[in-house]
Image (spheres, rainbow, N blue to C red):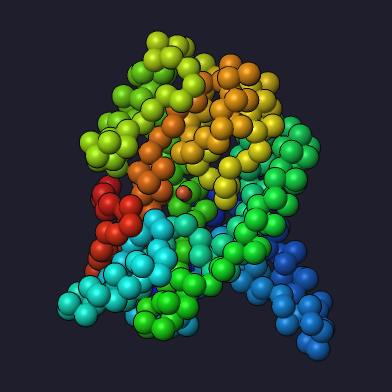
Amino acid sequence: MKLNILFRRAVEIGIEADPRGRKRIEKMLRKQQEKWKKLDVKEQEKELFDEERTWNPFPDSRIIAGTGEEEVRSLFVGIDVETQEVLLADRLREKGMRIDALMIHHPEGRALADLEKIMPLQVDMLAAYGVPVNHSEAHLRPRMDRVWRAIHSDNLFRTERAAELLGFPAFNTHTITDNLVYRFMEEHICKKEYDTLDEIVSAINDIPEYKVFAKKGNPTTIVHGTGGARPGRIAATEFTGGTNGPEELLKEQSLAGIGTILTMHATEKTLDAAKEHHVNMVQCSHMASDTIGMNLLLDKLMKMDKRLTTIDASGFIRVKRR
Ligand SMILES: [Fe+2]
Ligand SMILES: [Fe+2]
């Protein structure tokens, strides 16, 4: 399958699971298309406009190296792929392994440069739990500005250049797959009933990816609350939306009636807010969580092309589901 086709399908799959909903996304894309059409060819604004925004609603997910015309069958899959992993892929190829492209979870290149642009998705996700959109938006804006400023000064294009130099097409699927793990946790964990936090931890540890990481010493852990505590309403609000939201959103979730939040990485400030507002926090293995999202996407892509194969690297472990 051509990389372009594979990536377009991945975007479609990400949209299906997106908390913003298809209608809102289509409206957003239409606005970008209109903006693009109105720009004068001679203007600098047109030159700098990211045309990808007219069809891909995931600013943190894109093809970062290659033309997209490449035939891909064997994917080197990693949660973090930087120059060292690109070199590893090259070494493996030298030893005779077939590698057609690098499939990366955490954003690199322009996908990283545009990371903060996906964060408004959190407003829609929290709205589903009853947090007013004006509250979320007001708290999110300053945090988005901080993320933008922090990333802006980074050396953003090292991975893509390493991939280009060594002849690997590469693409990011960040929020595309975070949406999938968010839906998965909502359906398989949050919707069920538990008497205690310990029961949640045990249910999470039954999921194959979490079990593998738990066995390696990276288990699901309660970072606030006690094992015997009652969970109340459970929410998986820290799996998608680019990066952590501000701690103020924790208070908002508490006021909206959420009793337990499943997270991948609680910041110290968020944890302090959780203590203050009596919200239990269960921290799930970050790598296992990101791996689930990548696996769910690969399951769907493999339905399209049964010949797709993967090489597990950098925190990724392939688990197939029906
Ligand atoms: Fe992720
Ligand atoms: Fe992650």
> 81 or 317, which is in the foreground?
81
Q: Residue at x 66, y 69 (%)?
A: 54
The image quarter in which residue 56 lies: bottom right
Tell me if residue 118 comes above or below residue 52 in the rendering: above
At 79% from the left and 78% from the top, the residue drawn is 45
Is 137 on the left-hand or right-hand side of 313?
Answer: right
The percent coordinates of residue 101 (x first, y second) are: 35, 73
Q: Is residue 5 visible?
A: no
Q: In the image, 141: left or right of 178?
A: right
Q: Residue furthest left?
A: 96
Q: Count of labels shown?
A: 0
Name the quadrant of the N terminus. bottom left
Instruction: Looking at the picture, tell me which residue is in the foreground, 153 or 41.
Output: 153
Q: Nearer the viewer, residue 83 or 72?
A: 83
- From this view, report whether residue 168 is shown above or below residue 146: below
Residue 178 position in % (x across, y down): 48, 49
Q: Is residue 53 left or right of residue 228?
A: right
Residue sitting at 48 percent across and 17 percent down?
A: 225
- Quick check: 64 above or below 283? below
Residue 114 rendering spot, x and y as whole percentages: 63, 62
Q: Position of residue 211 (x, y in %)?
A: 26, 36
Asked if one can make out residue 284 in the rendered structure from this viewpoint, the answer is yes
Res 46 → quadrant: bottom right
Residue at coordinates 46% horizontally, 12% vertically from top-left?
230
Q: Quadrant of residue 57?
A: bottom right
